[in-house]
Image: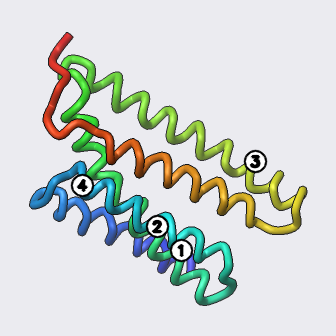
Amino acid sequence: MVALVYAAGALGQLLCGRLADNYSDRQLYFCLFLVTIPLVGLASQLTEIPLVFSMMAVVFLSTGSLPVENILLARYAPSNRHGLVFGSKFLLGFGFSSIGIYLSGWIFDLRGNFIWLYFILVLLAIAVTLIAYFLPRKQILQSI
């Protein structure tokens, strides 16, 4: 089952990367996270096989957003700072993902389920959706 979730993630990167070549990356990023919000909420109520399928969709969308995110970073970051920006992105990603492991264990120990973890994930998806909505339409940053 875990392999299916990872396969969905890989497929998401390929398909969403292709979509980013043909459509507005800003709007695509917004839509990917907008759709993620109800799917994570739905996943919080599911178990077993339905949960696996729901999480396949969530992983498809969240990993599918990565190529679009990279395009946005390249567009809005000054060209002489791309290395710093992408390095910071991966540092933050790996740092926060490791904190997520401890957070999920702590939440389960405290509550006996993962409802609050899903709630936090929904809030984060809402925050990313709002940020994507307010991104400028044109490139505004130039080399500093």
Residue shown at 69% from the left, 84% from the top: 47
Q: CA distance from mark 2 to mark 4?
A: 19 Å
Q: Which image quarter holds the N terminus?
A: bottom right
Q: Nearer the viewer, mark 2 or mark 4?
A: 4
* First in sequence: mark 3 vs mark 2: 2
Q: Mark 2 packing: few (<14 Cα in 10 Å), some, or many (20+)?
A: many
Mark 1: secondary structure: helix
Amino acid under disc 4 = Gln
Residue shown at 24% from the left, 49% from the top: 26
- How far from the left and from the top, in percent, is residue 21? 12, 57
The residue sitting at the top extreme is: 144
Looking at the image, residue 132 sits to the left or right of residue 113; the answer is left
Mark identifier at residue 27: 4
Amino acid under disc 2 = Val
Q: Which image quarter holds the C terminus?
A: top left
The residue at which mark 2 appears reads as 59
Amino acid under disc 3 = Tyr
The residue at which mark 1 appears reads as 55
The residue at which mark 3 appears reads as 102
Tell which of 101 and 135 is nearer to you.
Answer: 135
Q: CA distance from mark 2 to mark 1?
A: 6 Å
